[in-house]
Amino acid sequence: MTPLRPAHYLDWNATAPLRPQARAAMLAVLDAPGNPSSVHGAGRKARDGIERARAEVAALIGAATERLVFTGGGTEANALGLAALSVGIDALLVSAIEHDAVMQTARAGTVPVEVWPVTADGVADLAWLAARLGRGDRVAAALMLANNETGVIQPVAEAAALLHAVGGRLHVDAVQAAGKIPVNLTALGADTLALSAHKLGGPQGAGALAFASGIRPTPLWRGGGQEQGLRPGTENVAAIAGFGAAAQAAQAELANAAVQAAWRDAAAARLKAAGARIIGEAVPRLPNTLCLAVPGWPSERQVMWLDLGGVQVSAGAACSSGKVRPSPVLEAMGEGALAPSALRASGGYATDASQWSAFADLWLDGYARVSARQRTEVA
Ligand code: PLP
């Protein structure tokens, strides 16, 4: 057994460690609390903090501050965006690889949902969309900017152009993409775009919905007039401040993406040489994400082996239940057979080459043992 080593955290797509800048911004708020709706000095200070954070988050995605509202996370931002685009339509086209935050919300709505297929590489099929739009009914669609499991980047701008040409609208879940690749609401043609703080080094439990001019979301619930009345309830000022600081830091680091990708690719090449399939390697992917599969070594055992050696990764999507279930993303790609042995490793701003190579060393060690055992059993 490989001796225990200090933990190498490679599960940033599940949640990114809190950035020091975010922590500092949050502590400053916690040490000087105030309700942003209060008119006294403490309240005004809290309000200033929220507006600073709004400007920082809006800058990360090229959005207008007056069209960006804070929410309680990515799930809620997606729900707010989908609700905004679901008014007066005949069908909601949802890509087959959407996160449950989008897929389950869409299915729970009153508008009929149609699943928009992806190609074998995990890219939303634009030919299918063009053909579907030819029907001429009123539609909206949901397409994530980058997939949480494979990291595959989606043709959002192309999809938006097709939809807009027939009066349709597009919701974009940019939760995994923001802070990892450049994101611009206008260039993408997104009508609504969802973000989550904890995926880019902010705290869990904060998110945002940005929307294009001409879009007017309706609140999911009623209460006070906070966030233009679109998200009633006293704001989570500390979390929002942390979100803003994290967004600003993430933006400053976007240039390092190529270095991250090179470390990830070096590890991937070693795994591939030993027999692993690298999912989505033929198409543009997030620089931090590695999804692989190796038939014969179940995902849970890979995760446990790596965890015992101090490397933390994920078996497909980290489900809220904590249970591992077959990946609908790989199934949608026609790779359902690989799902039971799929693994996701994902890095971030504090990951370095040594962590990716420790992951590859340990994985190769484990795989060699599994393969040797399988050979003995067959003999
Ligand atoms: N969308 C995607 C693509 C995600 O990966 C996640 C989280 O895993 C979410 C939405 C949900 O975000 P949150 O955890 O902030 O609710």
Image (cartoon, grey):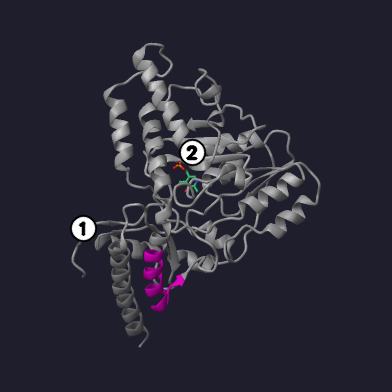
Find residue 108 and report its image quarter: top right
Can you identify the residue that label 2 sits on? Answer: 59
Residue furthest to the top: 40
Q: Nearer the viewer, residue 320 or 202?
A: 202
Q: Earlier in the sequence, mark 2 or mark 1?
A: 1
Q: Which mark is residue 366?
A: none
Q: Determine the residue located farthest toward the bottom in the rendered image.
A: 379
**Amino acid type of the residue that numbered disc 2 sits on in the rendered structure:** Ala
Picture residue at 40% right of the left edge, 65% below the top = 262
Q: Residues within 10 Å of mark 2 (few under 14, many from 20)?
A: some
135 on left or right of 317: right
Kindly report the distance in space between the C-alpha atoms of the residues bearing marks 2 and 1. Answer: 36 Å
Q: Which residue is mark 1?
A: 6
Region rendered in magenta:
262-277
Callout 1 secondary element: loop
Residue ID at (37%, 74%): 270
Left or right, residue 166 beside residue 377: right
